Image (spheres, rainbow, N blue to C red):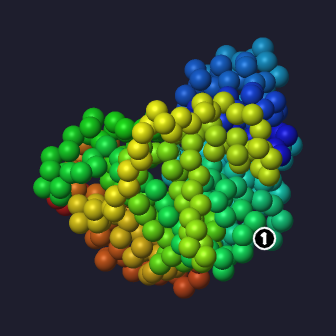
Amino acid sequence: MAEKICILGSTGSIGTQALESCSHLGIEVTAICAGSRIDILEQQIRKHTPKVCAVADERKALELKARVADTSTKIISGAVCSQEICDMTDCDTVLNAITGIAGLLPTVSAIKAKKNIAIANKETLVAAGDIVNELIKENGVIMLPVDSEHCAVHQCIDGRNKDEISKLIITASGGSMFGKTRKELEGVKLADALTHPNWSMGKKITIDSSTLVNKGLELIEAIRLFGIPEDRIDVLVHRESIVHSMASFVDGSVMAQMAVPDMRLCIQYALTYPEKKQGLTAPLNLAKLGKLSFYDVDNEAFPSVELARRAVRMGGVMPAVFNGANEACVDLFLNEKIRFTDIFDYLEYALNTFRPRAEKLTIDSVLEADSEARGLIYELASQKDK
Ligand code: NAD
Ligand code: MG
């Protein structure tokens, strides 16, 4: 069980819930890190008294430094502060809840500093999962998933041999656009895509949920975390978000993990594993729910999961290309520069067009592929704009 923790992305949806869970569990918060929201960071410093706080935005960091001059928290800033903080603090666990590929280098630093990792930042595993897995082995640390589906799978398969597992079944809420046809999706407005039926999350993952790219990313995340190949991982739409994922076994039995949708359960699981502790999550009342429903994914209207499968089969840096292209697409969609359905077409374009240069999979080749994939997408969008 974690005793001292560093929380990266502390001002976000996962980060704030992680702080709540730490207070509940009596885990000491030795360090926090975020992009720029210093009002929230000031409150967190006063409440949790971390030794260090890293702020990516240097101007905001100066302002925060002045505001908390009466406390003993040291403020650091700059482009690599999220990596430095993992080295500086005396924690045993780093919870990475940064959004996007920005979470990759901090994860690498934390592993090299021999910290256990609670990983919410799925993009790290999608883009560079094989490298991260090697580093985990080399440094003898543990990585536990925070993502609800992977937390569920972990609970279903814990203690089992891989050859006993026939399939993993990742559930998907279906997002805010469930049931819409491709034609209907063309007119989707930003505000509609930003409303999630069951979870309250950061903007990027909310858009990813509406396009089902999130499920594509989670499929790759599951391959990296559990070592199960792509053709043995199914995706199943489950509107109620009560069954968080399942595993089927060679004897025909299926294990499912159920709970009301509450990320604090998953955060707590990653922090207290292998123990289970009294949590903050409300009990599940199945009689009140009455029924649970399941559907196949509409791969025609939402090609994202199939595109993710293709990226995995292409191998090498292609999952990083899929992820980087998607981050650029979400940025363009959030700024209302492209349409909802353009995201699917642009992702396909990135997979069709990208030509990997480096032979070897390294952190540098992953970051290079990520940046080139973004470049492809921004260029395509600007051509279409003309
Ligand atoms: P969010 O947008 O609410 O928060 C992101 C946090 O990261 C903020 O604190 C932000 O300041 C920080 N950040 C962003 N860029 C940074 C940088 N360059 N340096 C330092 N800090 C930076 O996002 P979220 O919804 O909490 O999601 C975080 C991660 O967890 C994502 O990878 C997401 O896919 C994953 N996740 C989230 C949920 C959820 O319920 N929100 C569920 C499963 C997985
Ligand atoms: Mg998830």
Residue 128 or 64: which is nearer the viewer? 128
Please, what secondary structure does the residue beneath circle 1 have? helix
Question: Relative to 76, is 100 on the left or the right?
Answer: left
**Residue at coordinates 42% horizontally, 73% vertically from top-left?**
309
At which x and y percent is residue 261? 52, 39
Residue 164 or 58: which is nearer the viewer? 164
Give the residue at mark 1: 137
Q: How many marks?
A: 1
**Residue at coordinates 46% horizontally, 33% vertically from top-left?**
288
Task: Give the vertical position of 206 relative to 375 (above or below).
Answer: above
Task: Give the vertical position of 309 relative to 172 (above or below).
Answer: below
Q: Amino acid at mark 1?
A: Lys
Question: Relative to 253, is 71 on the left or the right?
Answer: right
**Is residue 280 visible from the viewing direction of this image?**
yes
**Residue at coordinates 32% horizontally, 53% vertically from top-left?**
211
At which x and y percent is residue 78? 63, 42
CB of mark 1 near ligand 1 (< 8 Å):
no
**Residue at coordinates 70% horizontally, 46% vertically from top-left?**
269
Give neighbour class at mark 1: few <14, some 14-19, many 20+ (Cα, 10 Å): few
At which x and y percent is residue 201? 47, 38
**Is residue 58 visible from the viewing direction of this image?**
no
At which x and y percent is residue 274? 80, 52
Residue that protrudes farthest toward the bottom in the picture:
359
Question: Relative to 115, is 301 on the left or the right?
Answer: left
Residue 38 or 123: which is nearer the viewer? 123
Residue 253 or 18: which is nearer the viewer? 253
- Which quadrant: the C terminus? bottom left
Q: Quadrant of residue 30?
A: top right
